[in-house]
Image (cartoon, rainbow, N blue to C red):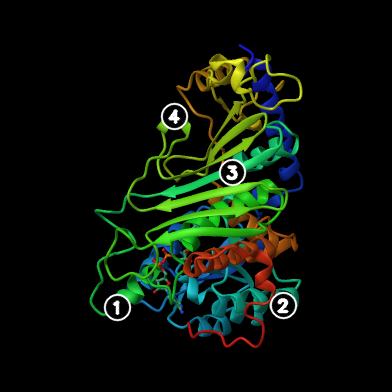
Amino acid sequence: MPNQPTRRDAVKTTAVGVAAASSLITGAPWIQKVKGANSKVSYGFIGTGSRGQYLLKHLKGIDNGLCTAVCDVYQPALDKGAETIGTNPKKFKDYRELLSASNLDAVLIATPLFAHFPVTKAALESGKHVFCEKSLVFTAEEVHALRALANSKPKQTLQVGLQRRYSKFYQTAKQMIDKGMIGQVTHIRGQWHRNTFAKDPWNKPVPAGRTDKEQNWRKYREFSGGLTAELASHQIDIADWMFGSGPEYVVGVGGTDYIKDGRDIFDNIQLIYRYPKGQKLIYTSMTTNQHLPLFDGSRTEFGECIMGTQGTIHITVGTDNEPALGMWFREPALPSAYPAGKSAAPAAVGASLVSTGKGSKGLPILLDQHKVQGSDSFLQSELKFAKLWLYGKGVMVPEEDSNPVDVELASFFDCCATGKRPLADLEVGLHDSTAVILSNQAMYDERKIYFNEIDKMGKGPVAPKKA
Ligand SMILES: NC(=O)c1ccc[n+]([C@@H]2O[C@H](COP(=O)([O-])OP(=O)(O)OC[C@H]3O[C@@H](n4cnc5c(N)ncnc54)[C@H](O)[C@@H]3O)[C@@H](O)[C@H]2O)c1
């Protein structure tokens, strides 16, 4: 079966996995344990809401950072954040007080999007290293202002919370693409579909003492970039990384068509990006259906399909319960009867030549840890061979040994300590934010927007919004 992945192919993806993992991990001390309490990075956490608490839960297991302060304007979130990390951090309601009162090396920021820039700006100005959740900034003015400010502080780390950059599956997919294993990559399809029609996590009950705009800020354009900022930002970044450049222009259609609860953000978005070599990213996010047509329907909601002239990669970062996953499909062989020089069958050649043919069976993308090593004991190698067989049969799926969120957090503290540049650095974050801003503008204005428009947008003095 020429289009079925073979054992040799399995070895090839393993080899790439090994190369990817080792080239990224060689000299990558983020996964080394920091020895002794003195080498821990002392940090404060600002914005201990839903994401903040999730990150603090992961931070409990990261031993090269120590949480000494937490901050939230909302008392229940502040208390929950302190309780989650469990290090008896000092509590602040005003981030400016946290920045000036504490002996901190770094801050992590998980406030709503509209407050990312003012908090990041103040933190950088107070000499702290910064980890800020995606999407890094909210407006075109902030793109320019943060670039200038962060570049004037080259000794301070700035990392953005795009955790897919820290996944070994994504790193391996990038290596496979760069090695030409799926041919010329021409299209990427990305989706983040949810079915929130009945129950919407963006429309949480509003507790006494809070307003809907404080509790459900994502619904309102004055605070939020909607589905584009909250969901698409992750996957536009993947397309930029895999294609090796940012887009040239974007067109899109969005609508507030199904969820009528006073929101002014869109409840469905459809975006097409053209990249400089003609590649396209076709992106959709919706709130009425969560089917994911990848991985034989075994996952829901989000993932990317990377299409090349010789193969396809299905990939997702997953969740804490359903870890990251990558599958590789070889492109079925083209019918050999095509006349030389013709890329498609002429109508006269006959129906059999234009049939869709048989697809190839997917091969799981394998990483270093899945490979049988010379140093493995007999039992270890037998176990690995058994697992490889089960992966091949689709009974088991290979997993990364670390959650990308844990890797991004440990890596941040390592960058603070060593001065190394983060994988998800300032420019990655600003390109991503630019894409969010311009994509929303394209849908609001119903026009094609070239990415170089950002050079003219939002120039001049910036009055940061009050956070
Ligand atoms: N990387 C990811 O996969 C991922 C996932 C979820 C959320 N996020 C990002 O995390 C951020 C927060 O999202 P969330 O779901 O936790 O929102 P949330 O509303 O649950 O939490 C935000 C918290 O920030 C607090 N806050 C608001 N203004 C503040 C200020 N000036 N100072 C201190 N605290 C302030 C709020 O009281 C709230 O508790 C967003 O930017 C979101 O896009 C990233």
Q: Give the quadrant of residue 449.
A: bottom right
Q: Nearer the viewer, mark 2 or mark 4?
A: 4
Residue, disc 3 = 188
Q: Give the quadrant of residue 313.
A: top right
User: Residue 92: x percent and y percent?
Assistant: 45, 80
* Label located before the other in sequence (2 or 1): 2
Label count reads: 4
Classify mark 4: helix, strand or loop. Answer: helix
On screen, 360 above or below 160? above
The amino acid at mark 2 is Ala
Distance from disc 3 to disc 2, alpha carbons, whole Å, reads: 32 Å
Farthest top residue in view = 1
The amino acid at mark 3 is Ile
Q: Is residue 446 left or right of residue 242?
A: left
Q: Which residue is drawn at 30% across and 64% down?
A: 203
Residue, disc 1 = 211
Distance from disc 4 to disc 1, alpha carbons, whole Å, reads: 42 Å
Q: How crowded is mark 4: few (under 14 residues within 10 Å), some or many (20 or more)?
A: few
Which quadrant, please, contains the N terminus? top right
Residue, disc 4 = 296
Classify mark 1: helix, strand or loop. Answer: loop
Classify mark 2: helix, strand or loop. Answer: helix
Q: Which residue is drawn at 67% across and 39% down?
A: 185
* Label located before the other in sequence (4 or 3): 3
Residue, disc 2 = 148
